[in-house]
Amino acid sequence: MEIKVLEQEEIQAIKDLKVKREQLMADFGFIEIRIQELTLQKENLTNLLVEVMNSEATLSNTLQSKYGNGSIDLDKGEITVVG
């Protein structure tokens, strides 16, 4: 078996590529963690949206039962009942 010596520039090129690869791996790991965090935030916001929609439906049903069908003017605090 023959052993040959690499040139200094070749050794440095290999080392530089190794450093770049390690940095990319670290960056990908960071991005993956952010993706997971954002996924959790999205799930939490989706749950909050469902709660708001349920509250809107409940309030709408309550107001409809109390006043009947109509349109609400929030500025005047009035409801115009239809039919």
Image (cartoon, rainbow, N blue to C red):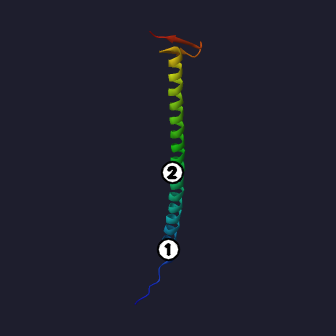
Q: Secondary structure at mark 1?
A: helix
> Where does residue 72 sit, x and y in percent of width and height?
53, 15
- Residue pushed farthest bottom? 1
Compared to residue 12, the image places residue 64 above or below, namely above
- Residue pushed farthest top? 83
Mark 2 packing: few (<14 Cα in 10 Å), some, or many (20+)?
Answer: few
Q: Secondary structure at mark 2?
A: helix
Closest to the observer: 21 or 30?
A: 30
> Where does residue 22 sit, x and y in percent of width and height?
52, 65
- Circle count: 2
Look at the image and tell me in which quarter the C terminus lies: top left
- Residue at 48% in and 78% down: 7
Q: Residue 9, which numbered label?
A: 1
User: Which label sits in the foreground, 2 or 1?
Assistant: 2
Compared to residue 32, the image places residue 8 above or below, namely below
Sooner in the amino-acid sequence: mark 2 or mark 1:
1
Q: CA distance from mark 2 to mark 1?
A: 38 Å
- Residue pushed farthest front? 65
Q: Residue 62, which numbered label?
A: none
